[in-house]
Image (spheres, coloured by chain):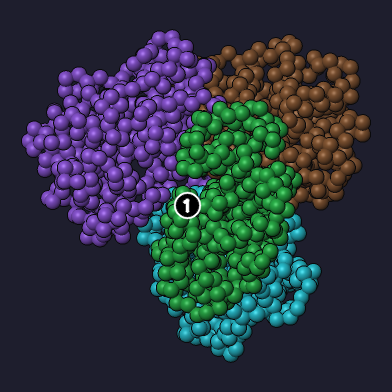
Chain colours: A purple, B brown, C cyan, D green
Amino acid sequence: MAEKIPIGILGATGIVGQRFVQMLEHHPWFEVAWLAASDRSEGRPYGDAARWKLKTAIPARVANMRVAPANPEGAPKVIFAALDASIAAEMEPRFAEAGCAVITNSSALRMQKDVPLVIPEVNHDHVKLLECQTWRKKSGGFVVTNPNCSAIGLVIALAPLQLAFGLDTVMAVTMQAVSGAGYPGVASLDILGNVIPYISKEEEKMEEETRKLLGKLNGSGIVMGSFAMSAQCNRVAVEDGHTESVSVKLKQKAKPEEIIEVWNKFRSLPQEMKLPSAPEQPVHYMTPSDRPQPRLDVDSGNGMTTTVGRLRPCGVLDWKFTVLSHNTIRGAAGAALLNAELLKVQGYLE
Amino acid sequence: MAEKIPIGILGATGIVGQRFVQMLEHHPWFEVAWLAASDRSEGRPYGDAARWKLKTAIPARVANMRVAPANPEGAPKVIFAALDASIAAEMEPRFAEAGCAVITNSSALRMQKDVPLVIPEVNHDHVKLLECQTWRKKSGGFVVTNPNCSAIGLVIALAPLQLAFGLDTVMAVTMQAVSGAGYPGVASLDILGNVIPYISKEEEKMEEETRKLLGKLNGSGIVMGSFAMSAQCNRVAVEDGHTESVSVKLKQKAKPEEIIEVWNKFRSLPQEMKLPSAPEQPVHYMTPSDRPQPRLDVDSGNGMTTTVGRLRPCGVLDWKFTVLSHNTIRGAAGAALLNAELLKVQGYLE
Amino acid sequence: MAEKIPIGILGATGIVGQRFVQMLEHHPWFEVAWLAASDRSEGRPYGDAARWKLKTAIPARVANMRVAPANPEGAPKVIFAALDASIAAEMEPRFAEAGCAVITNSSALRMQKDVPLVIPEVNHDHVKLLECQTWRKKSGGFVVTNPNCSAIGLVIALAPLQLAFGLDTVMAVTMQAVSGAGYPGVASLDILGNVIPYISKEEEKMEEETRKLLGKLNGSGIVMGSFAMSAQCNRVAVEDGHTESVSVKLKQKAKPEEIIEVWNKFRSLPQEMKLPSAPEQPVHYMTPSDRPQPRLDVDSGNGMTTTVGRLRPCGVLDWKFTVLSHNTIRGAAGAALLNAELLKVQGYLE
Amino acid sequence: MAEKIPIGILGATGIVGQRFVQMLEHHPWFEVAWLAASDRSEGRPYGDAARWKLKTAIPARVANMRVAPANPEGAPKVIFAALDASIAAEMEPRFAEAGCAVITNSSALRMQKDVPLVIPEVNHDHVKLLECQTWRKKSGGFVVTNPNCSAIGLVIALAPLQLAFGLDTVMAVTMQAVSGAGYPGVASLDILGNVIPYISKEEEKMEEETRKLLGKLNGSGIVMGSFAMSAQCNRVAVEDGHTESVSVKLKQKAKPEEIIEVWNKFRSLPQEMKLPSAPEQPVHYMTPSDRPQPRLDVDSGNGMTTTVGRLRPCGVLDWKFTVLSHNTIRGAAGAALLNAELLKVQGYLE
């Protein structure tokens, strides 16, 4: 296994950190080499420090690794980060400055001008933005981000529409799973038999990240997508999987069968280059009238496929439909991992 | 109690029928005098025939009443109906023809040209439409309907906005409780930890009923509201209370504090006439950023108040906000009961 | 209202503290006069400091009261306490020493030799134990406790059996609501669609508290009940209401109809003296084969009645049955309140 | 694939029927050749007739198969049955009489004297009982059953204890998943946020099946296990996985570490013969104090391993512990499939 690239994980004990460990267990290119978390965990075996909440068993090798201090010294050159935004804001620059490739799920730097916000199927060319980073110039280190769990499924469903028909207006209402809030996250007393119509800063993130992701790289910056956009975010009593009711106005007329074909045939660089975590089909349109549903469809494409359904005319905009995306796989750990695979084939991890 | 108006209930054993029985228990004007349900229940004591699912005890007097055959013979002159649409389509005309005042929660006749679809706070003048009904002319009987459980909360929140600022466009995404589907209704395997993005015919009902309710009575017909409208309906794992994420475009500019004042000060005929089931405040705006929530707010105003929250600008239309309404009280039994009270004070139940 | 006894609440912002505020709102004898909580809340209006989680609105008068420092100075003479055990262990003695009547829901002192653990219907005579307390002798202050939320329903169901037939053996398996763990308490990721077969120290509390409650006052101590006892405690996805599957062996033979009569006819001092919070019927046996259920029956007797059902022979002991009790009313705030009412009529609050 | 044994499925469209289809998709010995269900489904493609409720996609080949009439004519010689008990009582004998090997999950014939009730790890020798069946003698056909979903996990956990220490007394309280009731099964209004302390006939089945499974084959009959046994059955809001709180009295003294070793080392014929669906480890003891939990552990050993935890002394019997078993895999379709594999290696399917 000597040739695998050693990976460090910042924030390794949280829900997304655990997903990193899980998804890297049998990865052909990468292997977990270093784990860091809060001071409380430092020095303890990972298996003790992490309250493992996934259905697959904790990998034995990783369970026995000691949690390291969260410092660049001793850390590998490639870092996956799953930190709270406030901590990430301070720590990610420190690792980048020390020469690390920081591939992060945190929101801290996503909207920073010189930081690429990337979905490999959608805007892999935005990666070039990292060449503008001061860290890159000084130490070779850099930061690449992936979007919020509520934005990514939406954007993957919108990207083929934008390519084929142009995008004029987007309205999205989310029904988000509790795992999106981490652990312990949402209190059971707040969500059992309930809907919470508010997630702090989520709507702002969805709106601005969607525009950046669907924007154009222009020299040293991104020209934001010009469509109008509005998001409303709700929390529901679902474990995994964000469901979204979406309405769009397109720039060109489209027939429903054309839209469905555009979705089902959508392929991009990750599929062409057969990146290990890339789903065969990034978008899958389901024909039954009551799908997608999180309980039945969230694991589609190992949690990396965005499922879409219920395409029908909208009385206000042009079309309405339902989008489902796995929030801790495609919406977090899997997003960062696919970014890392993209960076690898683009030569940035050498 | 001799002066109370005797009430018959069609579909008395279902979830909405049970709510009728519950809400009529201590009613000052009405009392349950006759109960009908499917053939299976006929002749049995109501307490045996109904699988009582409410948290208050079944009223002892009603529990001992025998379920009657569903025929106008022997039925009182005022009938509350809570039948499946397909049965209602056949049965409600039969009772109206026999001279009964049929006050129904069923969707069967709601969109029929000469049938009033009424929310007393919103369009009490539409009641006059019943004078056009052939039944009325022949036997004195008539049919008055209330809207779908997903439409009523929305319309009560929209009515004050329409009055004050004019309504241009409405988009609504619902997260609906399982009690809206009756009993047994939604299978637990379908909804535990899940969202179902589809409820048969619900979006069509929401869109057309909203336009009829906010339309204008014009001689012998209703001129539908002219605003654009789009609805998306989802089922979530909530017992009671439909939550809706709404966006609107108004005809005139409005400040948020004006909108909130318009909601909180909205009063109408039921409040002025102090109808027994009328909530003191039809719309209540909640200021905390994470309200309304079904678990905490559904019983507001004994389940008759529509709670609204999270008013904020919309990136596509003008404003977005959250609406919550109790689906089996304000959205079904309470809606019909308030219609009956309106009809009483208007002299139609004599 | 000058004659009402002023009440101070320690731990006023938590779930049980909120229940105290709710249950005292219209109380004929007591009124909230002082609220204390953690340092974080000190000085803030209660309405801001408490994240109110109950379905009834927060009482306006109390919402505006400032949270006081948790010191006996300035506190009223009667204190209701809803503190975490570790804090209670230090704070309750301090208030008792300062001359306060501390009526507490905390587990800290329940098993202390000179501290009464009381259910007014079951062992009101145990109150006399407080005369042995050093605090009582020095300052007039004392501590009286009520049992754990998992023990109280069981003991109320067992007490009439012990009186009528004698108790030989008790086995209980609980399915406990999440509100029993306070707020935020159980993480939604831990309990949605799940059972957690473990609640820290709960089984020990159930077993020893049951024996103390059903024990005999003997001079300056309690002779523990001599029956064998085993408890297993599970957490389930229920908001309010602990359900328990119980098996018992009695000392004398009993017929099922005798047992049911003994339950339904059970009355005690609180009923005779018509204490304001006493349920008319402490134990109510439900005959339908699938009752009691927390969703339908938890509010029986305003949450103060213990409902029992499914009495049938046990293949190992004599009888098995199901018990349901409201864990934050009868099992916490209501238990302490009824203890306070008992102390009042016994002359201990003067 | 010509050499695979063709399998017919009776009751193919239900939840257990779907599990049969799912588990047979890549089976090395068997393949689905014939599907029957109710009249309503007859003649339709299976993919249309079955409302597929599993997370893996419906196998394309099977989806296209037509549902056949439920008659032995045209059916293969090996039949997996997942019928309601009342239908099974009539239909299973008819197929056996026609010469079919009927391997059934139904309760209809489980307790019949000459019908083996089998868990391959526990009582594989009981299979010989089928030689006493009249069907076997006349046509070669026979019926073999597997236990109820609530009994099987318990019995797999008890079997090693009985072997090592002898079994004196068993008490079990279940918390059962909704999938055990089939589809649509439990209404969501009945179980959201609730516990139902009753499942029709379940306790009787658990008690008598446990004794038959742990009984001894004696010539042409089974001598029932002689231990005392009591079961209480509850339904909880869990999708898959029955959790049980168990207490036992053993005939010999045992130390906890001995019991745990006996569980973890338990192996039997299916493991020795490496039957395709046999779990490597039939019983797995989990050491964390809050395990097993259905959400995290139900898929252990592909849903075929029984997980056990929380072994501790019982104040009434000797030991108490928690058992978890997947109710539609180990408790239904997987149980029948493993029985079929056992029958295959024993030469009964030729």
> Against C140, is B322 above or below?
above
* Residue nearest the viewer, comparing A151 with D5: D5
* Residue nearest the viewer, comparing B171 with B11: B11
**SS for dot 1:** loop
**Mark 1 belongs to chain:** D
**Residue A89 visible in the displayed image:** no
Residue A232, quarter of the rendered image: top left
Residue D69 x/y as whole percent: 69, 33
**Residue C88 visible in the displayed image:** yes
Give the amino acid type for the residue marked by disc 1 in the picture: Leu
Residue C291 x/y as whole percent: 69, 57
Q: How crowded is mark 1: few (under 14 residues within 10 Å), some or many (20 or more)?
A: some
Residue C281 x/y as whole percent: 72, 65
Residue lying farthest right?
B74
Q: Residue at x 73, y 17 (%)?
A: B112
Q: Which residue is drawn at 52% across and 75% down?
A: D165
Residue lying farthest bottom?
C219
Residue at mark 1: D275
> Against A58, is A140 above or below?
above
Residue C167 x/y as whole percent: 67, 79
* Residue nearest the viewer, comparing C200 with B140: C200
